[in-house]
Image: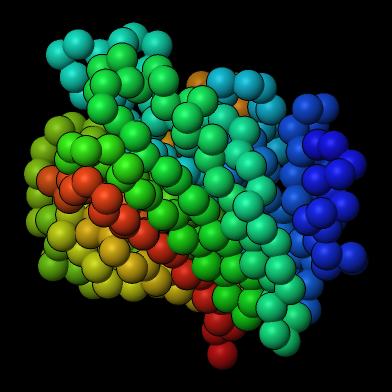
Amino acid sequence: MNKELMQKFSLGEQLCFDEISPGFPVIKVNNHYATATISLYGGQLLEYKPHDQSEPVIWLSRKAVFMQNKAIRGGIPLCWPWFGDYNSQSVDATLPAHGFARIVYWDIKSTQTLKEGGTEVILKMPCDDVCLQYKKVMNHFNCQLLLKITITDVLKLELISINHSQQEVPISNALHSYFNISNIRNVNIQGLEKTTFHDKLNGEKSSFDEAVLKFDRETDRVFVDTHSDIVLTDPDFGRKIIISKENSSSTVIWNPWQEKSTSMSDMSNDAWLQMVCIEPANVSKNQLLLAPGEMHSISLTITVNQIL
């Protein structure tokens, strides 16, 4: 990142710039409330730790690989404008899984200090450059993508899609959040009761009626038609993490468990014990269809409370 941009967007000791790996610039935030790291590659929040927490809230793999055209394992990757593999009869085999927002360099639109010591960062994806590949299969695609990250007494991410084309555009999106936990076997999730989910491991559709979701095996589920807050309770870390969302009709829950974790080169063998993904999304039957000129904003707010 050049010095002129660093001088333009730095906020003194509250916001500065660094490299997490050669060629991978990051924004470092240390404000009244928390510390955080935001990668310009992928527009991806990598780290977040409130000052009153002894453990990070967001998980980043110790073996994360920083390489162009490869997603960074951990943090909050952005899945856009599709989730999973691109679904088309004429699909270009080079189209990346989960879209291209998480594997391109983003631009800084603005940074500012908020009242009472908070920080706001707005990033913009250079869509004119990176969407050309997608136009091979959807030649009218012309969308703008912004990300607003606000760090106050809570962490908020807002992903904004704007359709500048003259036709409707299908969009799937997800804020693919990796949460740092003490042990996957000891945490539980509330807020998904009486919902329907698609099990991506066996292709089945099921109803989830239990009040609490616990983990004893690999889990990869897409819960649909759900708008409720999710509560991640971690007794060993003594905290509850509340995941609130807006304009999100799906929630994805994922943990790879031991066998899959050990087969992934960017995860350590015990990483599956220390993370769980809880992802506000609009996928599957909840995919969006943006009208010409329409804007859509999906947001995620993370609040951390101590267990008394």
The chosen color scheme is rainbow
The answer to whether one can see residue 144 in this image is yes
The answer to whether one can see residue 49 in this image is no
Relative placement, left or right, of 156 versus 161 is right
* Quarter that holds the C terminus: bottom right
Residue displayed at 52% across by 53% down: 147
- Examine the rendered structure and indicate whether residue 267 appears above or below residue 296: above
Q: Residue furthest bottom?
A: 308
Residue displayed at 66% across by 58% down: 110
Image spot of residue 39 (x, y percent): 67, 43
Q: Nearer the viewer, residue 262 or 205?
A: 205
Relative placement, left or right, of 271 versus 160 is right
Image spot of residue 194 (x, y percent): 13, 67
Relative placement, left or right, of 230 versus 58 is left
Q: Nearer the viewer, residue 157 or 11?
A: 11
Q: Nearer the viewer, residue 281 or 166?
A: 166
Q: Nearer the viewer, residue 283 or 62?
A: 283
Residue displayed at 24% across by 68% down: 227
* Quarter that holds the N terminus: top right
Q: Residue furthest front?
A: 166
- Examine the rendered structure and indicate whether residue 98 appears above or below residue 186: above
Residue displayed at 26% across by 27% down: 140
